[in-house]
Image (tube, grey):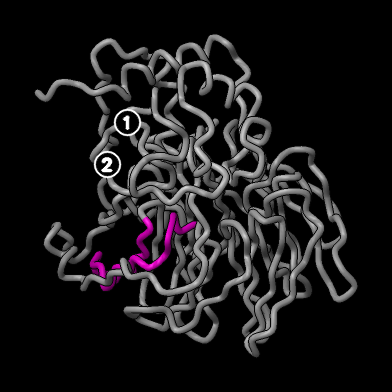
């Protein structure tokens, strides 16, 4: 479960005066050196990865896109251009890469990075969750506005509708486009429209094309489903937590989950090869290197890590995740329930930018009123004051019922004991505390 008390406003045209570009030297001062296997520099969880000829690109909830010299562990460029969390990256076939996220815009960047994108694609009315490349320079995007959009090199755009709710994944199979959504459906698209390839009855969070026209979809139940070109179906039990990222390379499939596990599978046999031993935090992104022998991961702890894709062993030391001390009097069970929420929300007043607003001082605060946070129009109306009762109501009935029209993800917490523990934790953890 991930709680979300806010969502980003959608920009309406114009440039971004706050856009900044830093040279790699600014990050090298943090201690990156030749041969480093852990790339550190993001100020929030890492949501997306893409391998490009120049190295590796990462992006995250801190709104930053970083281009790395992966061989030497050095950052070449850091770009802060998007107006919200950056959810998706993809290498472009003619060089450069594309990024997209909460602001609904897709930025096309030239090779090596730049101060501004070479081109901006606009049309989605909600966050963009995934990107993929297709034939003839075409780019596909999946949006939480319920649409799939195909962007041609000549500037024309095709809008595909059929999903009932947010679209989370998109892929080009070699012969047609496919998409996966919160409605549990995997759809294929051709010149005649869309057809349902499979329906699983629960949200699908990731989609990737496999050899021979097959697809892999990652579900909310922790199962990866392999859909053959002939419609056959195989299931890989990747864990008990939602699978949120998939990547293929070297005949292998990597599946990352909110539970912190990354599993490696043999595509031919559907056999589990390894489970990566990491810090046990949500892993949001995975990407195989071009040779298929190296795997990159990024997640909640803000670190990009490199792994041996054959053995699942880390290449370089793994820094253990720092244990955050509980505030005095905080409910331990409530802290556990809140664990997944840390991907989007901080508890302190001085935290850096994340996908959702800080929860510091949440009780007694009017909805949509935190200064400097770009709320959606629905939450900006501010017609709810957050109290233990209203927070509990929000996640008992669900944001889609309590605040209809918001782009806040739909989730519910149905266990009254867990809800009570969460409220007890928030009452202590979000309150002002004396300085030590």
1 and 2 marks in contact (CB < 8 Å): yes
Q: CA distance from mark 1 to mark 2?
A: 10 Å
Residue 329 lies, with reference to residue 324, above or below; the image says: above
Q: Quadrant of the N terminus?
A: top right
Q: Nearer the viewer, mark 1 or mark 2?
A: 1
Q: Residue at x 29, y 22 (%)?
A: 431
Q: Secondary structure at mark 2?
A: loop
Residue 334: mark in rendering: none
Residue 7 lies, with reference to residue 398, above or below; the image says: below
How many numbered marks are there? 2
Q: Residue at x 59, y 38 (%)?
A: 242
From the viewer's perspective, is 266 left or right of 79?
Answer: right
Residue 6 in the image, given as x and y percentages of width and height: 48, 41
Q: Is residue 229 visible in the rendered structure shown here?
A: yes
From the viewer's perspective, is 41 left or right of 12?
Answer: left
Earlier sequence position, callout 1 versus callout 2: 2
Q: Main secondary structure of the magenta part?
A: strand
User: 10 Å neighbourhood of mark 1: few (<14), some, or many (≥20)?
Assistant: many
Q: Quadrant of residue 81?
A: bottom left
Question: Which residue is at the front of the view, 180 or 213?
Answer: 180
Q: Residue at x 34, y 65 (%)?
A: 80
Residue 351: mark in rendering: 2
Residue 211 in the image, given as x and y percentages of width and height: 69, 66
User: 10 Å neighbourhood of mark 2: few (<14), some, or many (≥20)?
Assistant: some
Residue 144 in the image, given as x and y percentages of width and height: 64, 54
Residue 413 in the image, given as x and y percentages of width and height: 59, 22
What segment carries the magenta color? Answer: 63-88
Q: Quadrant of residue 333?
A: top left
Residue 415 among magenta residues: no
Residue 360: mark in rendering: 1
Q: Quadrant of the C terminus?
A: top left
Q: Secondary structure at mark 1?
A: loop
């Amino acid at each position: 479960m991930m709680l979300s008390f806010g969502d980003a406003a959608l920009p309406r045209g114009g440039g971004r005066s706050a856009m900044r570009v830093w040279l790699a030297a600014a990050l090298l001062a943090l201690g990156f050196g030749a041969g480093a296997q852990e790339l550190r520099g993001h100020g929030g969880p890492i949501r997306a990865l893409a391998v490009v000829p120049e190295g590796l690109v990462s992006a995250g909830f801190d709104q930053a896109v970083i281009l790395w010299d992966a061989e030497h562990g050095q950052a070449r460029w850091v770009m802060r251009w998007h107006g919200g969390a950056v959810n998706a990256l993809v290498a472009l076939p003619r060089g450069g890469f594309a990024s997209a996220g909460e602001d609904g815009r897709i930025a096309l960047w030239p090779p090596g990075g730049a101060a501004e994108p070479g081109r901006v694609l606009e049309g989605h009315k909600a966050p963009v969750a995934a990107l993929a490349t297709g034939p003839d320079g075409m780019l596909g995007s999946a949006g939480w506005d319920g649409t799939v959009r195909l962007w041609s090199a000549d500037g024309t755009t095709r809008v595909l509708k059929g999903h009932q709710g947010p679209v989370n994944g998109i892929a080009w199979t070699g012969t047609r486009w496919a998409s996966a959504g919160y409605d549990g459906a995997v759809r294929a698209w051709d010149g005649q429209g869309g057809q349902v390839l499979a329906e699983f009855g629960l949200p699908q969070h990731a989609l990737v094309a496999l050899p021979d026209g097959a697809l892999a979809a990652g579900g909310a139940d922790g199962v990866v489903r392999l859909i053959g070109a002939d419609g056959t179906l195989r299931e890989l039990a990747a864990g008990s937590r939602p699978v949120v990222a998939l990547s293929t390379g070297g005949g292998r499939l990597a599946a990352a989950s909110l539970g912190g596990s990354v599993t490696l599978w043999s595509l031919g046999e559907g056999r589990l090869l390894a489970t990566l031993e990491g810090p046990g935090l949500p892993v949001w992104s995975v990407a195989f290197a071009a040779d298929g022998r190296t795997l990159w991961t990024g997640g909640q702890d803000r670190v990009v890590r490199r792994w041996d894709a054959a053995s699942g062993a880390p290449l370089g030391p793994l820094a253990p995740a720092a244990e955050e001390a509980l505030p005095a009097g905080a409910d331990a069970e409530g802290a556990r329930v809140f664990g997944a929420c840390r991907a989007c929300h901080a508890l302190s007043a001085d935290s850096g930018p994340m996908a959702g607003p800080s929860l510091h001082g949440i009780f007694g605060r009017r909805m949509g009123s935190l200064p400097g946070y770009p709320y959606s129009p629905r939450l900006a109306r501010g017609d709810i004051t957050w109290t233990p009762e209203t927070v509990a109501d929000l996640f008992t009935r669900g944001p889609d019922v309590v605040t209809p029209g918001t782009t806040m993800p739909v989730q519910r917490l149905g266990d009254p004991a867990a809800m009570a523990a969460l409220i007890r934790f928030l009452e202590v953890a979000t309150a002002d505390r004396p300085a030590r």
